[in-house]
Image (cartoon, helix red, strand yellow):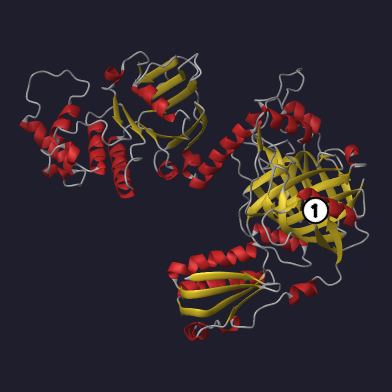
């Protein structure tokens, strides 16, 4: 089983380390939501972690906390050995590549494919008054886009908004990986795609992660994807890590096993004070 | 294709109209499965209006012919159309074309059985005498207090062999024999040379041992209750049409009456409508040395180590239930027995192992054969300590059984 972090220093070799991360939204109001309740996680370089969980379990909040979409209330976050807990989102962008659920997020629809990719190539870097698309970069763009095998290398001047969701998500994936980020975050990035496009994007995701040995956090609702992909699964429940599977446990895992775990979590929630009294009186 | 079901007194007739091919074979299969699930073991497939039969359809016919033969039921094809008749003759399945089956065979198997009422459900169980002098000698290996004080396997744990003549339940592990390996006792049950255990290691995966050759299942028992001997009576119960199921307490009451004692040991194999109960999820934490036992059932800590089916579970299963029961007069005095109904009229302790659904043969059946038949599925889907959730107004109630067999004998204490 993975060892929880016990100090404020990340474990040696950890590409991502979270120590006792907590976040409450609308604290002190009737709408208070304790979204993260002390999450500890350590991910070595090259690891591919899949995060599963029901609606409101905190999995997307966890991803957003790592990306820097908000500041956490407590705890520390280290990426590539650097304490990024207080870094704003744009500062973390040079370490983190990200693909969102909505294919229309993360790209500029009126700009061309080439222009969007050129922006991705400068993500997190200083930008000056030079040509956005020098000839050398154009050749590289064509080469990289051709690897998607979608015929988009001949449409580099087309507006990205004219592409299908699947094509756009594939390009977003390429953009997120352009600078070989220390950490790739995938936030249900196939949820809005039709089954065929989703399969295509998942295949591409797997290829890119394997080829570049990317350290990856993927949030998904698909138990089949969780079983097929990655080398570790974390199941979130009510803002905490409920259980983890890796190594041989992950390999033998099937969708029915995951369904059984979800059912177990549901049963846990249904065990209330009256049930505890009943068990006290009748169990032993 | 049109599929029409007609339940008659002596058999279930399914009338098909259209093509029985790959597109429809699964639907026909589901229709036949539904009849079997409703307890109909005599099925007639009327194929007068079937104009085409492919190999996908033949597969379904063979599947249910075999399944119903295994449980001594009957599956026949009546009024076969000319195209169907031709395919059946060419494929060697002509023997399936017979007159509509009847329940004569199973009625004959019931000969000599007396009846005992299940008053709450308003039905009668058939009671087959086995060995009128048989009793079960009771033992209580291990010590629940030692487990409660220590959490894991206490030093008082006892390795117990469960050969064919021993039934039992409690908390235990299937011992590996490896030195230093952590032992997490969880619910177990054993009967007829089979033992099932759900280790409390968080994996939630029951494991089992079945007697084979010289291999006799053994369980290291943290605490439990055993009965050694033979059974005196066999009850066959069936709720008839419907899916609501008979309350477990009703079957237990009838078994106590049939066994003729104030206390009895019971082994049931039954098709389930639902099971309600709890199981150890993890080994509860051990208190620091010298400290009193922790409040294990305190909320919310109890959630960490105990799993409870707050709503009916294992609806479409066949289960093996092992337990002990006594009337209100004797029950409170017997270790490990707790009230099974709010009135305290009967006390008991029952564990159930759930298996994928398999229909059970009707009439007089053999315990060892029936238990072996369950394990042929190769999977035990769950193990529960059965409880009656009598909380008002939203309790899950008690476990309910569609039909099954119950072997019972009075206890010798």
Q: Pointer 1: what residue?
A: B251
Give residue B103's quadrant in the image.
Answer: bottom right
Query: From where the camera sits, is residue A254 visible?
Result: no
Residue A6 in the image: above or below residue B188 = above
Q: Position of residue A167 (x, y in %)?
A: 23, 42
> Between residues B407 and A168, which one lies in front from this camera angle?
A168
Chain name for mark 1: B
> Between residues B38 and B375, which one lies in front from this camera angle?
B38
With B71 as the anchor, is A213 left or right in this view? left
Q: Quadrant of the C terminus of chain B?
A: top right
With B328 as the anchor, is B62 left or right in this view? left
Q: Where is residue A64 in the image (x, y as percent from the top left)?
A: 37, 24
Q: Residue at x 56, y 66 (%)?
A: B31
Residue B299 in the image: above or below residue A148 = above
> Between residues B346 and B304, which one lies in front from this camera angle?
B346
Query: From where the camera sits, is residue B62 visible?
Result: yes
Q: Residues within 10 Å of mark 1 (few under 14, many from 20)?
A: many
With A38 as the anchor, is A180 left or right in this view? left
Q: Position of residue B82 (x, y in %)?
A: 49, 86
Give residue A71's quadrant in the image.
Answer: top left
Q: Where is residue B153 in the image (x, y as percent from the top left)?
A: 72, 33
Q: What element carries label 1?
A: helix
């Amino acid at each position: 089983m993975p060892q929880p972090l016990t100090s404020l220093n990340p474990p040696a070799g950890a590409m991502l380390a979270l120590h006792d991360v907590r976040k409450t939204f609308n604290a002190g109001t009737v709408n208070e939501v304790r979204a993260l309740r002390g999450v500890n996680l350590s991910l070595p370089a090259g690891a591919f972690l899949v995060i599963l969980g029901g609606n409101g379990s905190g999995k997307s909040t966890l991803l957003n906390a790592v990306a820097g979409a908000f500041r956490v209330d407590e705890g520390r976050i280290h990426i590539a050995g650097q304490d990024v807990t207080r870094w704003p989102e744009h500062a973390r962008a040079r370490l983190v590549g990200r693909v969102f659920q909505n294919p229309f997020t993360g790209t500029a629809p009126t700009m061309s494919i080439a222009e969007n990719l050129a922006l991705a190539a400068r993500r997190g870097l200083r930008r000056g008054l030079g040509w956005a698309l020098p000839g050398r970069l154009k050749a590289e763009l064509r080469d990289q886009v051709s690897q998607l095998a979608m015929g988009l290398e001949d449409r580099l001047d087309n507006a990205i908004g004219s592409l299908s969701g699947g094509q756009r998500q594939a390009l977003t994936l390429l953009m997120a990986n352009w600078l070989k980020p220390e950490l790739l975050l995938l936030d249900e990035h196939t949820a809005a795609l039709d089954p065929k496009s989703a399969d295509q994007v998942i295949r591409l995701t797997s290829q890119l992660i394997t080829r570049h040995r990317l350290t990856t956090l993927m949030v998904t609702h698909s138990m089949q994807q969780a079983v097929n992909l990655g080398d570790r699964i974390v199941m979130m429940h009510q803002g905490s890590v409920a259980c983890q599977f890796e190594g041989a446990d992950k390999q033998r895992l099937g969708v029915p096993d995951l369904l059984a775990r979800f059912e177990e979590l549901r049963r846990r929630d249904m065990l209330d004070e009256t049930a505890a009294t009943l068990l006290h009186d009748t169990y032993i | 294709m049109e599929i029409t079901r007609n339940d008659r007194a002596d058999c279930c007739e399914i009338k098909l109209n259209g093509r029985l091919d790959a597109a429809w074979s699964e639907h026909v299969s589901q229709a036949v499965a539904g009849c079997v699930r409703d307890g109909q073991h005599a099925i007639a497939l009327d194929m007068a209006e079937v104009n085409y039969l492919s190999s996908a359809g033949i597969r379904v016919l063979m599947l249910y012919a075999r399944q119903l033969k295994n449980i001594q039921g009957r599956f026949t094809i009546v009024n076969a159309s000319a195209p169907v008749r031709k395919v059946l003759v060419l494929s060697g399945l002509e023997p399936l074309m017979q007159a509509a089956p009847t329940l004569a065979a199973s009625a004959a198997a019931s000969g000599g059985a007396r009846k005992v009422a299940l008053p709450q459900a308003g039905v009668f169980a058939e009671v087959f005498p086995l060995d009128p002098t048989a009793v079960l000698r009771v033992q209580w290996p291990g010590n629940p207090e030692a487990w409660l004080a220590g959490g894991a396997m206490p030093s008082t744990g006892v390795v117990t062999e469960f050969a064919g003549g021993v039934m039992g339940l409690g908390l235990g592990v299937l011992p590996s024999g490896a030195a230093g390996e952590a032992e997490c006792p969880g619910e177990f049950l054993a009967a007829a040379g089979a033992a099932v255990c759900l280790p409390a290691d968080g994996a939630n995966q029951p494991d089992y041992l079945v007697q084979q050759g010289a291999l006799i299942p053994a369980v290291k028992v943290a605490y439990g209750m055993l009965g050694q001997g033979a059974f005196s009576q066999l009850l066959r119960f069936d709720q008839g049409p419907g899916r609501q199921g008979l309350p477990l307490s009703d079957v237990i009451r009838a078994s106590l009456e049939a066994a003729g004692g104030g206390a009895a040991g019971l082994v049931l194999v039954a098709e389930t409508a639902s099971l309600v109960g709890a199981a150890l999820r993890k080994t509860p934490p051990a208190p620091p040395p010298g400290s009193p036992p922790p409040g294990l059932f305190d909320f919310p800590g109890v959630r960490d180590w105990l799993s409870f089916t707050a709503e009916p579970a294992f609806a479409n299963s066949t289960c093996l239930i092992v337990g002990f029961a006594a009337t209100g007069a004797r029950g409170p005095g017997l270790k490990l027995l707790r009230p099974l109904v709010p009135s305290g009229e009967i006390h008991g302790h029952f564990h159930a192992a759930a298996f994928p659904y398999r229909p059970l043969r009707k009439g007089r059946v053999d315990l060892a054969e029936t238990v072996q038949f369950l394990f042929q599925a190769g999977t035990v889907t769950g193990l529960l300590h059965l409880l009656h959730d009598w909380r008002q107004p939203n309790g899950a109630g008690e476990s309910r059984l569609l039909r099954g067999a119950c072997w019972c004998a009075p206890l010798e204490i």
